[in-house]
Amino acid sequence: MKRKSLIYSLLLAIIVSIVSVNGSIHAAARNITDIVKVTKPTEIKVGEWKSYEIAITDWTNAEVTDHDFTPTSSDENIIKVVRKTQWVSELHAINKGTATLTVNIGEKFEPYVFTVQVVDEYTVIPEPTPEPTPEPTKPVVVKELTQAEIQAKIMSQDLSDYTDQLNLINNYENKAITTINKYNKIVNDSTRKSIFLALNNTVVPNYTKYVSGLKNIKPNKNNAELKEIYNYHLAGAKLQLEAFILMRDSMKTTKINFTKYNAAEKKGAEGIKLLNKVEALLDKYTKKYFE
């Protein structure tokens, strides 16, 4: 006897059960998206409308042009359908809410159902940000500083600390020097009074504050080079102040005391010489530790 396979028996049993229940065998209903492309909105702003359109994709079905693809709204208080053609409709948003729209073109096709939400404002759905591709992990190499680099770092910090302290009093020096440089002219009876007032009211008071501030500056006591720079700086500034005071005193009366004035010029020159030394030492310091 010829035997049937098990799969054949199972298929036969399924067919028999379908016939028993329905009385006949029917082909499964198709989806309308098998024969057309549906263009529809998912969201419409209240008071606006958007188009619902059908484009035929399968012309092998002779009846495709006979179907009316106009959708039916579940709630026309939310979405009202305005038919234009059998393939095109306008969906008008009446009130906020969600409506279900159904397209039914006959028994051969499953009803096509979609929903449209009516909103006050459109929802902006941001594009997903792609995750950056992580860089391959590289081993971290910690370079140990040489003794010279460690020393340079210390000396750099010392100079930075020293400069920070100077910055607190530099405005006094700037005001004094800027003012006296305005009167860099021949001293005589006609210029005496204006120079005296500048020295008495601006130069001497501000430079006195500058020198007082310098005395309170504390360079790193372990940094001999910076201490040398500081000592020259303070000595030069003191001579400058003495020169300004002498110069002022030489002009107190209507008759200029040129003995005092010349002494002031000499003392000022000595002070400038020391301050020039400071600049030279600073230049040497920076070249040694920063280049």
Image: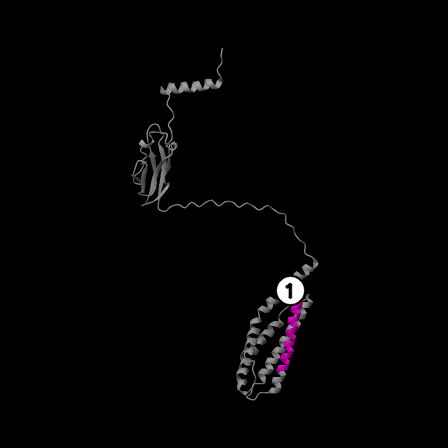
Most extreme residue toward the bottom is 255
Q: Nearer the viewer, residue 148 or 201?
A: 148
Name the quadrant containing residue 226: bottom right
Expressed as whole percent of the image width and height from the top left, the position of residue 82 reads 29, 39
Q: Nearer the viewer, residue 106 or 165?
A: 106
Residue drawn 69% across the image and 60% down it: 148
Residue drawn 46% across the image and 18% down it: 8
Q: Is residue 254 above or below residue 56?
A: below
The three-letter code of the residue at mark 1 reads: Asp
What residue did someone put label 1 on? 158
Expressed as whole percent of the image width and height from the top left, the position of residue 268 reads 62, 79
Q: Left or right: where does residue 13 sit relative to residue 235?
A: left
Q: Nearer the viewer, residue 140 or 228?
A: 140
Label 1 sits on a secondary structure element that is helix
Q: Is residue 285 magenta?
A: yes
Q: Is residue 188 above or below residue 124?
A: below
Question: From which residue to which does the magenta span run?
Answer: 264-290
Q: Left or right: where does residue 278 sit relative to residue 191?
A: right
Expressed as whole percent of the image width and height from the top left, the position of residue 262 reads 62, 84
Q: Is residue 249 above or below residue 102?
A: below
